[in-house]
Image (spheres, rainbow, N blue to C red):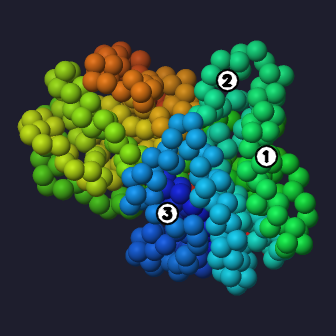
Amino acid sequence: MSRIVVTTLGTLGDLHPMIAIALELRQRGHDVVFVTHKEYQSKIEALKFEFHRMRPDFTALDNPQEMAQMMDLKTGQEYMVRQWANPNLREMYTDLLNVAKRADFIFSGEGVIATPLVAEKLRMRWASSAMVPMSFFSAYDPSVLASFPALANLYRLGLTMNRGIVTFAKFVSNSWAEPIRQLRRELGLSPLKGNPFIDSKFSPYLVVALFSSVLAKPQPDWAANTVVAGFTFYDGTQGKAELTPELKEFLDAGEPPIVFTLGSAAVMDAGNFYQESIQAAMRLNRRAVLLIGNNTPPENLSADIVAVKYVPYSQIFPNACAIVHHGGIGTTAQALRAGRPTLIMPYSHDQPDNAARVERLGTSRTIPRKQYFASRVAKELCELLENPSYATKAAEVRHIIQAENGVSAASDAIEKQLQAV
């Protein structure tokens, strides 16, 4: 069988879908190696995968100030590219190259900007992943841009306007790619064709869309070699974990609670989220579970509200009446699979677009981060919980997603490429 390098950067929302596929590929007999942040070494090795560090390190996981910069609504994306990824491009390239030399294939997250360089240098086949519809930056199915949300108001003007917005985005980010162009010249690789963050970032062999077709369907300007596999779920449980006795007792003691969570990254920059969430739950006289990460537990909580560090979403979300979160694609996927209405407070990156898409599905409402106050949150949640259309639509979407098998579809597509190696 083949030796496959799986490489990714970013949060657990980026890592977990790749783990799900890696487990399936290993089950099929392949030797799977991970190349990613050193912060994930223990997690990867606990699953008995071979691990190799790839820079940059994800120090923001322990640095709230850095995480706040990464999550900034206006400048978060530019910061991550120009101040985090680009300065470490050469190290990223070297780290990945040293492992890929002994492999047959690379399956890459799109944030790994060194993958196309490594693959071209080694003349090896590779596949890229697209975690969210926004990855394709389609003029036919335009996205909400975190840095320029007002542009979404122009999409109704038609395809010509939408193409102009795509061109504008290419222009804005074009200078970000200069370190990539420089390294390509030094390595003797072919010049870039297009913008490596928008229209030339995907593999020429295979692009695997790791989201459900309920969020987006293939468009004429998507990469022609795209396979829409569906969500690939992994949160450390593999169906075997159980809730703690204390939390299970709380859930059994009353009506389904509202679950408030900020994922694995935004939780580092929580701001007033938990304080306002507590007040909103109290206004509604609703029970609540707060997933607070490493934040200090709130004091003097009532018997109807509990705060816990972490619970696998696959275990807690089905027990909720509604879920309030930041719009990360991993959290969004788990909420859709659980079939629960959601209120989304997006931070940055793909989150505003994810929020807009599930709102169009009829399963969710959106609240701007600057407006996340108890009174407004309570009003939005009241509409979610009292209007039965949200629960009905969420149940319909749940059935669609549960019928998909993203892990199998993605693994089949990768194995098809391996046959051509």
Secondary structure at badge 3 equals: loop
Q: Which quarter of the figure is the N terminus placed in?
A: bottom right
Query: In the rendered structure, which amino acid carries the disc numbered 1?
Result: Asn
Point out residue 298 in the picture as x, y percentages from the top left corner: 17, 43
In the picture, residue 29 is in which quadrant? bottom right
User: Reading the chain from its start, which is encountered first: label 1 or label 3?
Assistant: 3
Evaluate if marks 1 and 3 touch, with contact meaning CB atoms under 8 Å apart.
Answer: no
Name the residue that disc number 1 marks: 174
Q: Residues within 10 Å of mark 1 (few under 14, many from 20)?
A: some
Point out residue 46 in the picture as x, y percentages from the top left corner: 40, 76
| 197 shown above or below 39 | above
Q: Residues within 10 Å of mark 3 (few under 14, many from 20)?
A: many
Task: Give the alpha-carbon distance from disc 1 to disc 3, as whole Å.
Answer: 25 Å
Name the residue that disc number 3 marks: 58
Q: How many marks?
A: 3
Residue at figure coordinates x 58%, y 72% from the top left = 54
Name the residue that disc number 2 marks: 151
Point out residue 285 in the picture as x, y percentages from the top left corner: 16, 23
Evaluate if marks 2 and 3 touch, with contact meaning CB atoms under 8 Å apart.
Answer: no
Q: Mark 1 against mark 2, which lies toward the viewer? A: 1
Residue at figure coordinates x 76%, y 60% from the top left = 179
* Of 307 and 256, the residue lying toward us: 307
Query: In the rendered structure, which amino acid carries the disc numbered 3?
Result: Phe
Q: Is residue 375 left or right of residue 403?
A: left
* Of 398 and 328, the residue lying toward us: 328
User: Reading the chain from its start, which is encountered first: label 2 or label 3?
Assistant: 3
User: Reading the chain from its start, which is encountered first: label 1 or label 2?
Assistant: 2
Query: In the rendered structure, which amino acid carries the disc numbered 2?
Result: Leu
Evaluate if marks 1 and 2 touch, with contact meaning CB atoms under 8 Å apart.
Answer: no
Secondary structure at badge 2 equals: helix
